[in-house]
Every structure is written in structure tokens, then in C-alpha cells.
Image (tube, helix red, strand yellow):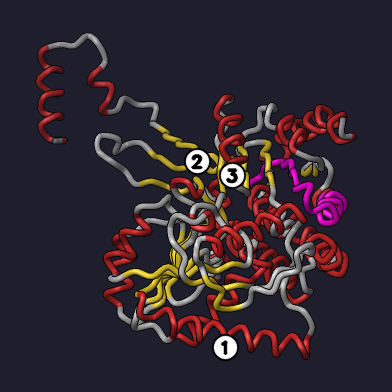
């Protein structure tokens, strides 16, 4: 048994006893907690960078941009807005309740479970934690066992910043996660793959626990004939190879008119050359794959595609044993290949050719709804058609990935790519219960006219009311 498993029941009781205190804290009290968290992170930046390098080979620059900056921005956003979000939200008078007063009260759900993934092991543990604590909850965080250095650091830093009575970090493998899912949490937020997401949803549903699933899927990039290809290629190249391709909203494949494929591949070669030229000066800028099994799966996807007739247009030089895989662009890809049936989650970018915009729209609509959709175009009518005729968790026009960092936009999926959302106010509301409160005066009101007995006069009055309200 993992040592953490023995302590889970006692930890659970500690967090349960803290819930009434957390529920009554003011916005100022909760912001103080978040500022203590910020202070601890600031003081531990070097340790965080070292942990992420140990787990993912992540360059310090990428850690700053994708792990630390997003967390600082979220704390700042909550500090500026939490007092407004916590206020009771009044609702207007409504016939026949003209003498009543109503409002919505945001209450913490209680004790929540956050199951974090390995690909952004710091950010994707701390971002939902910020929202959960700001909403007044106690929290259990289960980091990924595949990022052991970051997991150990989270277990040290988070209770230090927020208190053992507010947050517990429970490390371990899937058996620990399964034991946690047997506890009656008040909300579960899971970030990860579809297979485990189904297990989490099933376990939560068996206890009628509300849940948020942040999954993934195959996020397409449509490149219109009106798009400027060099800037498009540079953005796509960056978004695809960010974090070694291990990003849930990474561009998964390119979709475009067949005639444009030679032009986009040349533009991607230029983007790759600029990166390689820069690395000769500034050092490596690409993350490694998380572990040998994952790297082996990416290699298998590549070999399957090549065996089926795909061609390498950019990159393709891979170490057969190591974790550092060179970004690779493939043409000649068909929908029947494995890499078009699975989320790639690595540094391979397939290109799919179509004849018309209608074919591209139909291609995307025929597949499970993605977590993100990217469209590059100068033609506003093309962008409008994608906005109206497609469905995805988020949509970004003429750029990739950056929508995740906007504090006023929700992060969430739809259909197979997830359910629910968080970030900013959406996170506060995810971890809150919106309680309906209606206050009536002591004196009789309109509804008292319809108390039994149901006399002929009351029946006529009810008929008039029905006619009036229709």
C-alpha cells in the first residue's frame, strides 16, 4: 500500500472539519490565502523550474510562460474580481412575485478533488486550486505519478502556502486515485485522457457527485486560401511543438485545400529552420516526451503512417531510444491511419487535403467534437462559417493555444472533449453552488389567494391568471 493511502481517511476528516470555517470567510480572507500562495510560488521559482526540467526536460523559458505566468495571472485576476463574484446576485421582481425579493447566493460546494495530469503538472494542479480555494472549498489534489519531481514539490509547497487544513496533496498511482474516488467529494475536476475520464465520470456518477472533465481530442487547424502562410506556419509550428506536443489544445492536424499543401510545407520548413538556428545560440527549446512508453507510442504512430504512404516533409530525425523527438510534418496522410484516429499528443503534424471549404467543415463535423478549433483566414465569411457551422470547446482565429491564457475566457470541452469549464469567474462558479434565495413578506401575498378550498371564485381567478400569463 502506498504510504499516502493509510493517511487518506484522517486527511479527509481534517478537511471536513475545516469546511465550515472556509465557507464563512470573506473575499478579503480568501484573497489573503491566494496572496500567500503567490508568495510561496515566487520564493520557489527555481525549485519549480528544476522539477519541471527533471520531469519533462522543460526549458526555463517555457516553464516561465506556460506554468508560472499563467498562475500569476490567474491569482491577479481573482484578487481584482473575487469581491464582486462573491456578492449576492439580485434578481428583479417578477409577476406574480412582485412583493418578494430574490437573489442568488454563491456557496462553496465543500471538499473537492482535483486530479491533475503530467503534461503541465504544476499549472494544471494550481489553476483549479486557485478557483476552488477562492470559492471557499477545502481541496485534495492528486498529481500525476508520471511527474514525480513536480508532484513532490507540490506536496511541499501547497500545504505550506494554504495550510494543511485547507489543501492536501495525495501522491501515488492509479490505485490511490481509485481510493480517492470512493470518498464522497462535493465536486471532482479531472484533467487527462478520455479513457481515465470515463472512469472518473462513472465513479462520480455512482455517488451523484458533480464533475468537470477537461479531456482533449483532435483539435484541427483549418488554413484558408486567404491566410498569410508564413505567419500561419510560424504560429502553428510553435503551438504544435510547445511542451513537446504534449498539450491538450495543441494543433493536432492541418486541414486545407490540396493545392496549398506544397506552399504550407515550405513555410513550415522555414519556421523549423528559424527555430534550429535560434537553438544554436540559445540552446534547446523543445521538451522531451514524458517517458519511454509515451515516446514509443509516438514512434509507432509515425511508422504506421509511413507504412501507409505518408511522407515526411519536415523533421523526422528521431533517436530510436531517447525521449527527444524532432518535430515532424507529414503529407500524404489518410483518415484511416492511426494518427488520424487517436489524439497524437506528441510532435507529429499531419496534413489533410480537401477540395472545398464544405469538405473541411464536413470532415470536422463527422468526428468527435474537439477541445479546440483553429481557423486561419483573412476572409471574414470563412471565419463566420466556422463559427456557425462547427462545435468545439474553444475556437481561436488566426492563432493557436493562446485562448487558454485569457482570464475572461473559460477552459472547457464539449462532447467527447470534456464537460464543464473553469478559469476566472467560470472556475469560481464551477466550485460554487448557486443557491436560489426568495424572501417573502409576512403579510398575505398573491399566492395566498389560491390556498384551499378551491372555490368557484378562485377558479375564475386562476383562469384569468393563466390567460394573462400565456
Measured from the top left, where is residue 220 in percent x and y? 45, 64
Q: Which mark is residue 82?
A: none
Label 1 close to label 2 by CB (< 8 Å): no
Element under disc 1: helix
Neighbor class of circle 1 (other Cα within 10 Å; few <14, some 14-19, many 20+) is some
> To which quarter of the image does residue 39 belong?
bottom right
Mark 3, residue position = 431
What span is colored magenta in the figure?
135-158
Tell me if label 3 and label 1 are in contact, CB under 8 Å. no
Cα gap from disc 1 to disc 2, whole angstroms: 51 Å
Q: Residue at x 68, y 73 (%)?
A: 326
Say which residue appears at 71% left-offset and 56% top-offset.
296
Q: Is residue 145 magenta?
A: yes
**Relative to 329, is 14 above or below?**
above
Q: Quadrant of the C terminus?
A: top left
175 lies above or below 340: above
| Alpha carbon separation for disc pair 2 and 3 | 10 Å
- CA distance for labels 3 and 1: 45 Å
> What label does residue 270 carry, if any?
1
| Quadrant position of residue 211 | top right
**Mark toward the viewer: 2 or 3:** 3
Q: Note whether residue 362 is visible.
A: yes
Labels 3, 1: front one:
1
Q: Are marks 2 and 3 in contact (CB under 8 Å)?
A: no
- Nearer to us of marks 1 and 2 is 1
Residue closest to the eye, 111 or 287: 287
- Say above or below: 185 vs 229: above
Residue designated by label 2: 434
Residue 405 image offset from top left, x and y in percent: 58, 67
Any magenta on residue 123?
A: no
Q: Quadrant of the N terminus?
A: top right
Amino acid at each position: 500500500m502506498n504510504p499516502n493511502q493509510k493517511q487518506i481517511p484522517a486527511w479527509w476528516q481534517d478537511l471536513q472539519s475545516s469546511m465550515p470555517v472556509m465557507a464563512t470567510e470573506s473575499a478579503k480572507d480568501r484573497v489573503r490565502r491566494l496572496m500567500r500562495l503567490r508568495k510561496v510560488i515566487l520564493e520557489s521559482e527555481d525549485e519549480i523550474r528544476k522539477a519541471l526540467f527533471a520531469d519533462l526536460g522543460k526549458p526555463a523559458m517555457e516553464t516561465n510562460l506556460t506554468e508560472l505566468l499563467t498562475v500569476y495571472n490567474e491569482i491577479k485576476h481573482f484578487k481584482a474580481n473575487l469581491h464582486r463574484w462573491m456578492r449576492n446576485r439580485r434578481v428583479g421582481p417578477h409577476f406574480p412575485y412582485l412583493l418578494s425579493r430574490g437573489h442568488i447566493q454563491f456557496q462553496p460546494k465543500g471538499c473537492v478533488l482535483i486530479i491533475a495530469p503530467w503534461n503541465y503538472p504544476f499549472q494544471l494542479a494550481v489553476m483549479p486550486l486557485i478557483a476552488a480555494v477562492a470559492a471557499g472549498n477545502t481541496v485534495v489534489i492528486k498529481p500525476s505519478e508520471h511527474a514525480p519531481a513536480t508532484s513532490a514539490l507540490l506536496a511541499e509547497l501547497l500545504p505550506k502556502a494554504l495550510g494543511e487544513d485547507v489543501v492536501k496533496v495525495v501522491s501515488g498511482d492509479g490505485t490511490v486515485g481509485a481510493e480517492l474516488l470512493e470518498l464522497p467529494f462535493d465536486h471532482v475536476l479531472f484533467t487527462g485522457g478520455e479513457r481515465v475520464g470515463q472512469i472518473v465520470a462513472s465513479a462520480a456518477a455512482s455517488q451523484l457527485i458533480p464533475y468537470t472533465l477537461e479531456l482533449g481530442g483532435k483539435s484541427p487547424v483549418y488554413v484558408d486560401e486567404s491566410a498569410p502562410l508564413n505567419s500561419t506556419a510560424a504560429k502553428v509550428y510553435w503551438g504544435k511543438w510547445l511542451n513537446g506536443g504534449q498539450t491538450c489544445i495543441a494543433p493536432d492536424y492541418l486541414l486545407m485545400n490540396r493545392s496549398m499543401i506544397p506552399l504550407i510545407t515550405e513555410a513550415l520548413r522555414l519556421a523549423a529552420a528559424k527555430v534550429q538556428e535560434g537553438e544554436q545560440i540559445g540552446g534547446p527549446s523543445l521538451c522531451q516526451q514524458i517517458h519511454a512508453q509515451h515516446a514509443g507510442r509516438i514512434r509507432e504512430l509515425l511508422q504506421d503512417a509511413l507504412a501507409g504512404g505518408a511522407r515526411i516533409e519536415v523533421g523526422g530525425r528521431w533517436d530510436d531510444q531517447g525521449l527527444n523527438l524532432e518535430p515532424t510534418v507529414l503529407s500524404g496522410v489518410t483518415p484511416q491511419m492511426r494518427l488520424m484516429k487517436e489524439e497524437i499528443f506528441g510532435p507529429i503534424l499531419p496534413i489533410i487535403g480537401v477540395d472545398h471549404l464544405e469538405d473541411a467543415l464536413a470532415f470536422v463535423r463527422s468526428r468527435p467534437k474537439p477541445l479546440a478549433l483553429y481557423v486561419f483566414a483573412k476572409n471574414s465569411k470563412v471565419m463566420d462559417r466556422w463559427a456557425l457551422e462547427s462545435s468545439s470547446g474553444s475556437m481561436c482565429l488566426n492563432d493557436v493555444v493562446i485562448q487558454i491564457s485569457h482570464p475572461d475566457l473559460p477552459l472547457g470541452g464539449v462532447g467527447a472533449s470534456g464537460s464543464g469549464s473553469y478559469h476566472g469567474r467560470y472556475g469560481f462558479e464551477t466550485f460554487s453552488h448557486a443557491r436560489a434565495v426568495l424572501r417573502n413578506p409576512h403579510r398575505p401575498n398573491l399566492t395566498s389567494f389560491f390556498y384551499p378550498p378551491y372555490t368557484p371564485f378562485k377558479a375564475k381567478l386562476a383562469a384569468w391568471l393563466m390567460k394573462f400569463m400565456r
